[in-house]
Image (cartoon, rainbow, N blue to C red):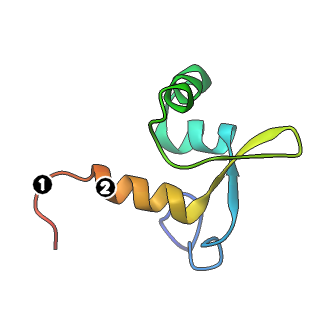
Amino acid sequence: MSSHPFGSHDHLQHAFLTQRDLEERWKLSGRTLERWRAERYGPAWFYIGGSIRYRFDDVLAFEERRRKGPRG
C-alpha cells in the first residue's frame, strides 16, 4: 500500500481533483482556494460541468514550485 494520500500518483497524472479534494490534501478552507483563484494564485484550474477542477499534475507542479529547503 502506498503512503501517498491519493495512492500511487502514476495513474492520477492526468486525473482531476475537486476543490474538496484539494481542501483535504492541503488542509485549507474552500474560501482560501476561492480567494487564490480570484488572485490568480495557486495551481491552474478548470470549470467543468459547473464545478472547479484541478489537474493533479498541475497540483504536483505547484507544490514543487513552493518547495523550500534542500532538494535531493
Q: Is residue 37 above or below residue 65?
A: above
- Between circles 2 and 1, the one closer to the viewer is 2
The CA distance from mark 2 to mark 1 is 12 Å
Find residue 22 and report its image quarter: top right
The residue under the point 67% across, 39% down is 19
Residue 9 on image: x %, y %: 56, 72
Find residue 16 and report its image quarter: bottom right
Q: Quadrant of the N terminus?
A: bottom right
Residue 68 on image: x %, y %: 18, 51
Residue 69 numbered tag: 1
User: What amino acid does circle 1 point to?
Assistant: Gly
Count of marks placed on residues: 2
Q: Is residue 44 above or below residue 36?
A: below
Residue 5 on image: x %, y %: 54, 57
Residue 37 on image: x %, y %: 55, 32
Residue under label 2: 65
The residue under the point 46% across, 61% down is 60
Q: Is residue 30 above or below residue 15?
A: above
Q: Is residue 66 above or below residue 72?
A: above
The residue under the point 59% across, 68% down is 7
Label 1 near label 2: C-beta < 8 Å?
Answer: no
**Other-residue count near label 2 (Cα within 10 Å), few / some / many at <14 / 14–19 / ≥20:** few
Q: Quadrant of the C terminus?
A: bottom left
User: What amino acid does circle 2 point to?
Assistant: Arg
